[in-house]
Amino acid sequence: MSIADTGTTPVQGSSPTRRTAPGVIPAKDMAVIWVLLAAAFVAILNETTMGMAIPHLITDLGITPIAAQWVTSAFMLTMAVVIPITGFLLRRFTTRQMFLAAITLFSIGTLLAALATGFPMLLGARIVQASGTAVMMPLLMTTIMNLVPTASRGRMMGRVSIVISLAPAIGPTMSGFLLDHFGWRAIFVVVLPIALVAMFIGWRWLTNVGETTRAPIDALSIVLSAFGFGGLVYGLSQIGSLGEGGSWVPLAISLAVGVVGLGLFLWRQVLLQKNDDALLDLRVFASRDFSLSMAQMFLLSLAFFGAITIIPLFLQDALELKALDAGLVILPGALAMGLLGPFIGRIYDSHGTRILLIPGSILAAAMLWLFTTLTVDSSVWLVMAAQTLLSVGLALSFTPLFTAALASLKPKFYSYGSAVVGTVQQVAGAAGIAVMMTIFTASVNAGGGTEVAGAVAAGTRTSLTIGAIIATVTIVGAFLIRKPEDDGGGPAEHMGH
């Protein structure tokens, strides 16, 4: 399909079609990728720092715990609303425009947060930050797919997994140190200069990649996306409050608005994509490998985000560890998940998906089943080992999943595919945390509350049984997903027209 056929305009920059040696990435293309990797790392690092700061915000700003929680909830909601529309934005605007807009929003939000004189200003600053953060990962993944030749995509996506894994691992530790010594504003003061350096480097050296389209932005789709994805994520995030005596009425209204909004949004996209005007082009799901990979990623994210929420509670309330010690128990797994990324990516490039997905899904499921046997007498070292092996299993799964998913698409659909990947992770994460926390809370309360270590252990076993069942289903999916090139075709043969 020619550029004229798609109604797109080429922009200056590198293209995989110009390559002379298979797998070779020109230095200027690598510079683009490194800038985007650094910016994404800073953005995700910031995303994970505020959870530790909530007690400090309650004291310093004189707000309630529920209000303080909105510092993280508003961030998550903004991400859920913005990510689905990034697929269109990345085709409508150039790489430089999107990067500079994202890093500028992030930097302005960070500055406003550091200068916040009260809670409303801090909340607004976090929303501005999230608007920039939401663009970073889809932009990074789309750029990699456009610049990196097929033979090296797994290796480069492995570096993305470093960003996804290491930033959340370092964030709470960095946040804890700064909170203990300098206060919550220091979190933003430290992040701001790094973001400004990334902005300068991007402004000075970043080149445009791929094609742009002149399609108009559909305002109705944006509104429906906000109600659909925002309503769903907010509703899911509130499910856990039911176990603490919260009302089901606002939750039901939020979920209903989300379901109706999402249905209308999807219907609108089907109409618009006939003229290549969709905000989120659903033709990406015409690819068998993409659809299977997204289903697998949704299930793994459900189990993973739920488990990493429950395990720290078990460590602190059942095994009676301090928060810092509980964090150190989780840290090796996060580090392993990130550092293994490039190695796993090389295996994908050489041998495809199944050699990674099958052992990865089996390992993840086995460790979650092991977690269902935890008691108040369980060894901290056992939990650390199981958590680390769970992370290794997930590392074996996530890198090949999103690499195979995007590789099964035509280049014009890379940005939409990247947006779907981000949306799936946001919605699945919210759903996993909601379901497992609700079960955990109900079980703990039935056993006497969090003051009773045995009740916390029982709640952990019950809730993580759900995660173990979900992870077991992914073993079947691991046998079905293939590296697109291994099917003898490539994107054109796997992508609907």
Image (tube, helix red, strand yellow):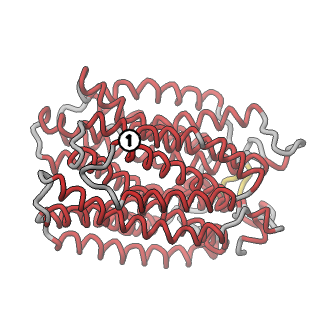
The image quadrant of residue 282 is: bottom right
Residue 163, position in %: x, y?
53, 40
76, 376: nearer the viewer:
376
Give the position of the C terminus as an image quadrant: bottom right
206, 162: nearer the viewer: 162
Residue 264, image x and y in percent?
43, 77
Q: Is residue 169 above or below residue 250?
A: above
In the current view of this chain or complex, which residue is farthest to the front? 377
Q: Name which residue lies at 47% across and 34% down.
A: 42
For the question of whether residue 121 can be seen, the reply is no
Which SS class for mark 1? helix
Q: Does residue 374 appear left or right of residue 245 in this picture?
A: right
Question: What type is the residue that disc 1 sits on?
Answer: Trp
Query: Extreme top residue here?
Result: 181
156 sits to left or right of 193: right
Query: Which residue does the numbered mark 1 point to in the structure image?
Result: 381
The quadrant the N terminus occupies is: bottom right
Seen in the picture, residue 361 relative to 282 is either above or below; the reply is above
Residue at point 85%, 44% (across, down): 19
Q: Number of labelled discs?
A: 1
Q: Position of residue 312 (x, y in %)?
A: 30, 47
- The quarter of the picture where residue 285 lies is bottom right
- Residue 485 appears left or right of 388: right
Residue 248 in sight from this viewpoint: yes
- Residue at 65 percent across and 58 percent down: it is 414
Measured as percent of width and height from the top left, residue 232 is found at 34, 67
Mark 1 crowd level (few <14, some 14–19, many ≥20, 10 Å Cα) = few
Residue 360 located left or right of residue 238 = right
Q: Determine the residue positioned at 81% across, 39% down.
A: 24
